[in-house]
Structures are given as C-alpha cells and as structure tokens.
Amino acid sequence: MDDSIKQAHDELLAWCRARDFAGYDPFDALNSRVFQSTPFTNSRAARLLWTQVLKRSPLNLRPLALVPAQKNSKGLALFALAALANYRRLKTNQAQTGVTETAKTHTGETETATAETVTAEIATAETEARELLDQLQQARIQGYGGAAWGYNFAWQSRNFYAPPGTPMIVPTAFAARAYVEAYQAFGDDNYLQMARSVCGFVLNDLKRTVVSDEEICFSYSPLDDTQIFNASLLAAETLASVATPTREPGFCDFVTRAARYVVRRQRDDGSWGYGAASGQQWTDNFHTAYVLLSLSRIGKSSCAGEIDLQSPLERGYEFWRERFFLADGWPKYYHDSLYPADAHAAATAIITLLEFQEMDRGARALAEKIAAWTVSNLRDDRGFFYYQRRRFQTVRTPFMRWTEAWMLYALARLLETT
C-alpha cells in the first residue's frame, strides 16, 4: 500500500488531536447564537432552511453565525474505534516482527530503539482509546433505560425535530460498537457492561413497529416511530454484538426479527431505500453501506442461526459495489449521479469493503483505490479532509464527525488490515 495513506492518517490524527477532537458538523446550524436570537427558532421551515444554508455553503459561515466548535458523541466513538484499530495494528506488528523485550535483550541498539518505540506507540494508542471512551461515558444521556447518546445540537430532519440531549440510535450504536471492541482489545469487563447497558435503551426506550410475529423495526429515537432501515439494523447489531460475549439468547429474537424486516424490503435489484415511507425511497452510498455492514456483523454473531443472510448480502453488496464507484475509486453519493463525491461515503465504503474481503477478493483493492482517490482529491495540505466535491465547487469545510472522524477510522482500519 502507498506510503501516502500512512502519511494521510498520521497527519489527520495530528490535526484532530491539536483541536482536541472538537469541531463543526454539517447539521450544527441550530447551535448558531445568531439564529437563536431570531423569532424563527420555532419554525420547522426556518430550521430546515437555516440548516441547509450552512450545510451547503462553499464557505464556512459558522464563525459568522456564532456556531461553536464542539465535541460530538458519535465523533468520539469513531475516534475511539480508530485508536483501537491502531492499537490492534501495533500489537499485531509487534508480535509478527518479534520486537519484544526478549528480542531487545539479545540484539543490538537499533532493535532496542525500535522495540521501545513500538511499545510507546502501543501505550499511546491504548491511552488515547481509553481517554476517548471515558469522555464518551461522561457524555451519555441520563434518564433512560440504558446508556444512550445523542448529538450536540438540535436536529430538524424531514421527519421530526429532536432538541439537544435527545438520545438517538445511530450515535448510541457506534458508542456500543466502540465499547465492544474495547472489551475485545483490553479484556476490560467495564467496557462490556457499558455496551450491555445500551441494550436496555434499545429494548426499553426505542419504539418498535411490530409488523408481524416475524418482523419488527426499531425507531430512530424515543420521540419518533420512523422506519429507517439502517437505524433499525444498528439497534439489532448492538444487541447481536453484546449477545455474543454475554451469551444472552433472549436478544436474538429481536435481532432476527429486525434483520428479517429489512431483508424483506430489499428491492429486486438488490438495493434498499433509506426507509419505509414514500418520501424515503432514495438510495445512497453510505446508508447502503451501513445496512450491509450491520447485516454482515449480525450474520457473524451468535444470533445468526435463525435467518439466512447470505443471499440478501450478496445481492445488496453486488448492487452497491457495481453502482457506487468509478474505476479510479471515485465514491458516488447516489447510485445514479456522479456528484457529489463525499468523504463520508468514501470512509464508510473503505470500512465496509474490508468487512467483505472473505466474500470478495477484490474488496481490499477497491478500498485502497477509494482511499487513494480521496487523499488525492479531498485532502487539504494541512491534513484534514474536505466535505464534498460538487460539480462546480468543492466544500472545503472540515466537519469533525462527518468527515474527519470517519476518515481517520477508515484509514486506521485500512492500515490495520495491511
């Protein structure tokens, strides 16, 4: 793999560390003190319009709009996942190269220095992962049936409005993923218990649309009853990932029913829409990747025995791989449109392709192409990645959660699997 990938990872990590992992977000417009001082704060239309104006502007208007740079719970989870990937990579490299305390005793000064450096790097990665997980724990939202997280801003979507402090399954599921991986890496039961607590939120606070005895769909938050495919699967993935080490088979019924709900709504061409509603029928790159990744992880869990996921995974993966990427690695946002090229879509694609290496021998090569394309076309010389490349302009605003955290996670995973 090209050394530019390692350089891009290291410089991005340094850029994020220098800002203490805090920054702007595509959807943080409602944190604007300018907007909050207007009489339009209670208007759904005004909130949507203001959010889109700041999100789509090629210039970063947030300093003028008095939007503060902040930490984001999902961003912290992604940064922790990146640190865990770095920790595993360094530990594996140490074991494979034999750079150990024993090797230091019987070799010269050069190897002694190398061993000491590797040991220090491992300690740094572990410390960083633990500190990010501690910050994540401190950011959890209280008052629910289990551990839960939300966004650091009010959020007006097409479907509902969520004030700050509303727990949502997407940041919560990524936090659970980070805690499960930390338990696997460090053997610390406290991390598994934190992930286990998330299952209480999933089962006690999220609404469930019960389609039949065989199908359910988890809501996005306790405030809504939307049927969004990737969100429901993230809830199911959380239950499955915890059930595997804790051996709680009671979770698996919910996992199977949620997976079956999404599988049965796969289109003939292998694709999925965003959700079940008539206005949610678009298909995009990273939400499709979320669906594939969650189904794959459910299929590899202890809950996999009650449903056959192989065929829908193969069909979905084939559609996604063939329709969302150009030969040079350009990641399309929509399957039927070249623009925009989005760094978030690139990052989720890299992570998902690495998940499917056993199914697709060419998955890693495509992941490397996407990474190389993104580094060449969406990376700033200062180390961060741009938001999007559009037909006539590039939005260069660095978004800490949406772009930087995802790209750091993706590059760390790519380096780990080299």
Image (cartoon, helix red, strand yellow):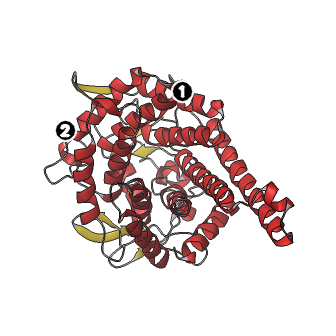
In this picture, is 8 found above or below 200? below
The picture places residue 212, in percent across and down from the top left corner, at 20, 23
Q: Is residue 133 above or below residue 418?
A: above
Looking at the picture, how far across and down is residue 344, in whole percent?
Answer: 43, 61
Residue 357 position (above or below residue 336) = above
Q: Residue at x 40, y 20 (%)?
A: 250
Crowd band around label 1 with a 10 angstrom C-alpha radius: few (<14), some (14–19), many (20+): some
**Looking at the image, which is closer to me, 50 or 170?**
170
Q: Which amino acid does label 2 sit on?
A: Arg
In front: label 1 or label 2: 2
Q: Residue furthest front?
A: 106
Q: How many labels does the image show?
A: 2
Find residue 211 and report its horizontal and vertical position in percent.
Answer: 21, 26
Point out residue 368 in the picture as x, y percentages from the top left corner.
44, 70
| 54 left or right of 278 in image | right
- Looking at the picture, tell me which residue is in the foreground, 190 or 88: 88
Residue type marked 1: Ser
Gap between marks 1 and 2 measured at Cα: 29 Å
Residue 163 appears anywhere in the view: yes
Secondary structure of residue under mark 1: helix
Residue 219 falls in image quadrant: top left
Label 2 element class? loop
In the rendering, which numbered label is found on residue 46?
none
Which residue is at the front of the view, 222 or 298?
Answer: 298
* 383 relative to 226, above or below: below
The residue labelled by disc 1 is 197
Looking at the image, the residue that sits furthest to the left is: 268
**For the residue carrying disc 2, how many other residues have a C-alpha within 10 Å: few (<14), some (14-19), or many (20+)?**
few
Judging by the rendered image, the residue that carries numbered circle 2 is 264
